[in-house]
Amino acid sequence: MQKIAIIPARGGSKRIPDKNIRDFCGKPLIAYSIQAALKADLFDKVIVSTDSEKVANVALGHGAEVPFIRPAELSDDYTGTSAVVVHAIQECQRMGLSPELVCCIYATAPLIQQQYLQRGFKALRTQAEKHYAFSVTEFAFPVQRALIQSDNGGIQPMFPEYIGKRSQDLPVALHDAGQFYWGRSEAFLASKKVFAPHSVPIILPHYLVQDIDTLDDWQRAELLYRAYYQHSSEDKK
C-alpha cells in the first residue's frame, strides 16, 4: 500500500508575507509539518506542492521532496485545497507512483503530532467503507447556545430553543482542526466530499489546535507551542 504526504504551500500570502517559511519559534513554519510527516514513519514520500522556488528550497532543506512546481492557475487566492491535492496525485501518477492513500498536511500546523497522523492512517486501514479521516476538535463552548447581535443593537440567542439547556445535555459539536486530511486517492480524484458520513473524525485536544491566518493567530500559536513543549519537557524531568 503506497502512502504519500502532500503539503500544499504556495508562495503568496497577503496577511502574513512568506507565511509558510517565516520563522516560527526557531524554524520555518513548514518545517514542523514536514518533520511530523517524516517522524510518523508512514509515508513512501513527503511531497511539498508549491509555486515558489523559495518555498521549494526551504522544503528540500528540511527533508521533503519537490518533484514538480504547481502551476499558477492552482496558486491563487481562490483555489481550494482539493484541487491542489488532485493535481499532486496526478503528478505522482505521471511519475509512475500509485498512491492508494494520500494525506494532505497543512503547512501552517506547527502543533501537529505524528501520533494523530498514525491514528488517521489506522482509521482508514481498518475501515474499508470510509473514504477520509481528518483532524477535528470540539468547540470550546456549546454552539447551540451562541448569541448574535439583533437588528436594534441588542443581543439574542441564535438558537432560542437551546439557550436554557445545560451544556451536558447538548450534543458535542466539532469543527475542522485544519491540520491533516487522510483520504483514498480515488476519493480525492472523484471529488467526494470530506465533511460527510464516509469520513472518520480524528479528535485533537484544544491545546494542539490553532488556525494561523493573521498575526494575532500567529502570536497565539507561538504561545501555545511554547507552553506545550515547556510542559512536555517538565513532565520528562
Image (cartoon, rainbow, N blue to C red):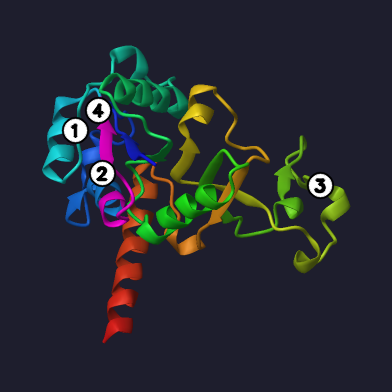
State whether residue 97 is above or below residue 126: above
State whether residue 95 is above or below residue 149: above
Residue pointed to by mark 3:
159
Q: State which tag comes first along the sequence, 1 or 2.
A: 2
Confirm whether the magenta stretch covers residue 117: no
Q: Are marks 4 and 2 in contact (CB under 8 Å)?
A: no
Q: Amino acid at mark 2?
A: Ile
Query: For numbered disc 1, what is the local secondary structure?
Result: helix
Residue pointed to by mark 2:
30
- Say which mark, if any, is on residue 55: 1
Q: Is residue 158 left or right of residue 225?
A: right
Confirm whether the magenta stretch covers residue 44: yes
- Say which mark, if any, is on residue 11: 4
Query: For numbered disc 2, what is the local secondary structure?
Result: helix
Q: Position of residue 173 (x, y in %)?
A: 68, 53
Residue at 38% of width from left, 56% of height from top? Answer: 220
Measured in 3D between alpha carbons, the distance from the residue under mark 3 to the one under mark 1, in whole angstroms, is 45 Å
